[in-house]
Image (cartoon, rainbow, N blue to C red):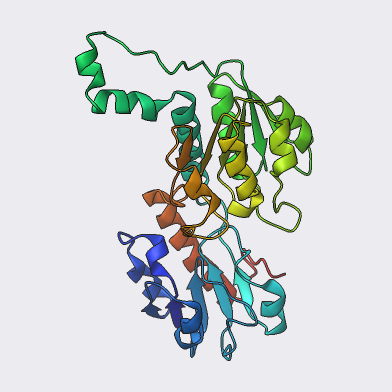
């Protein structure tokens, strides 16, 4: 069996990819541009990829490809209809990054809520040493106890974040398609209107694209903390940038973007140096343990597929 890993650099330089050789003959590519897709895929039975886009226009030499393994839960970068038409199976990985994403999501919320960047800079600049006062309490921050924390998309990650939020003393409101067993479930507009903190964990689809839009941003509290840990396009990024610039919302954090990495003319370049903005480079999923679990799951998906099973198939 021949296997190509198309964008190994997205998995981290420290990850031992040699374990994949237990199931086949592996070729590792650090990156694969659109122009290189056919060359890197040719002659392979299995493709392992994270962000490489596979569709009718990018993959024209698909002969012999039997399985695509996505090293992520989201699969919006792979055209499932195209794969079905060519008899190519597609598997994702679920549940591997729950702890990692939840940990980073809450860390971003806490950093923004406590104004940590400003307080750190006060010390680093020497202002604290020269000030002659034992403490600095500006900007003012408030406790999370008693605040309302909204979870948009309450699957594994959203549920984990919600439980941490409850441990911090927050009342959790959830927006999801079916009622949540642990949290009060409300519609998206009620959540946007009532919550002090909103974290987004919904997968990207035609339904969720720009779910957080200009209208819903206008309904949020002036001091709301909004954090996107889902997919960039679940928010209207231009509208979010404007909401920060016009002080419609209090703070914003995101680890994901509609185009990654984002370009020099992306709306977030206008706000990325503000104290109430925390932008990270799509790293929330990538704790070492999370990446090791992901790769292990990919190997299990390959073994299961060739054993005639349908483990983690997203094309059926």
Image quadrant holding the C terminus, namely: bottom right
- Asked if residue 186 can be seen in this view, the reply is no
For residue 57, above or below residue 283? below
Q: Nearer the viewer, residue 222 or 77?
A: 222
x, y (%) of residue 96?
51, 52
x, y (%) of residue 246?
60, 34
Q: Nearer the viewer, residue 60 or 62?
A: 60
x, y (%) of residue 127?
25, 20
Q: Nearer the viewer, residue 167 or 79?
A: 79
Residue plotted at (53% across, 51% down) = 256
Q: Nearer the viewer, residue 288 or 255?
A: 255
- Give left or right: position of 279 versus 68: left
Direction top: furthest residue: 133
- Asked if residue 216 can be seen in this view, the reply is yes
x, y (%) of residue 300?
51, 66
Residue plotted at (56% across, 16% down) = 145
Residue plotted at (44% across, 30% down) = 111
């Amino acid at each position: 069996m021949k296997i190509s890993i198309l964008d190994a650099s997205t998995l981290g330089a420290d990850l031992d990819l040699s374990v994949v050789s237990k199931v086949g003959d592996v070729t590792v590519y650090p990156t694969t541009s659109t122009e290189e897709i056919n060359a890197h895929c040719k002659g392979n039975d299995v493709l392992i990829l994270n962000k490489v886009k596979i569709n009718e226009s990018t993959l024209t030499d698909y002969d012999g490809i039997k399985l695509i393994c996505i090293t992520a839960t989201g699969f919006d970068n792979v055209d499932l209809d195209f794969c079905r038409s060519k008899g190519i199976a597609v598997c994702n990985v679920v549940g591997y990054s729950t702890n990692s994403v939840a940990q980073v999501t809450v860390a971003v919320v806490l950093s923004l809520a406590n104004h940590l960047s400003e307080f750190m800079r006060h010390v680093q600049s020497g202002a604290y040493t020269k000030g002659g006062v034992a403490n600095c309490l500006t900007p003012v921050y408030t406790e999370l106890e008693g605040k309302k924390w909204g979870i948009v998309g309450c699957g594994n990650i959203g549920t984990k974040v919600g439980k941490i939020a409850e441990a911090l003393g927050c009342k959790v409101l959830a927006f999801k398609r079916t009622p949540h067993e642990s949290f009060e479930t409300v519609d998206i507009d009620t959540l946007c209107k009532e919550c002090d903190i909103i974290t987004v964990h919904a997968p990207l689809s035609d339904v969720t694209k720009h779910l957080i839009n200009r209208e819903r941003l206008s309904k949020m509290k002036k001091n709301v903390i909004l954090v996107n840990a889902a997919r960039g396009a679940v928010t209207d990024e231009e509208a979010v940038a404007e909401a920060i610039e016009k002080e419609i919302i209090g703070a914003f954090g995101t680890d994901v973007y509609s185009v990654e990495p984002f370009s020099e003319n992306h709306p977030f370049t206008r706000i990325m140096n503000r104290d109430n903005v925390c932008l990270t480079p799509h790293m929330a999923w990538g704790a070492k343990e999370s990446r090791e679990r992901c790769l292990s799951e990919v190997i299990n998906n390959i073994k299961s597929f060739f054993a005639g099973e349908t483990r983690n198939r997203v094309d059926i």
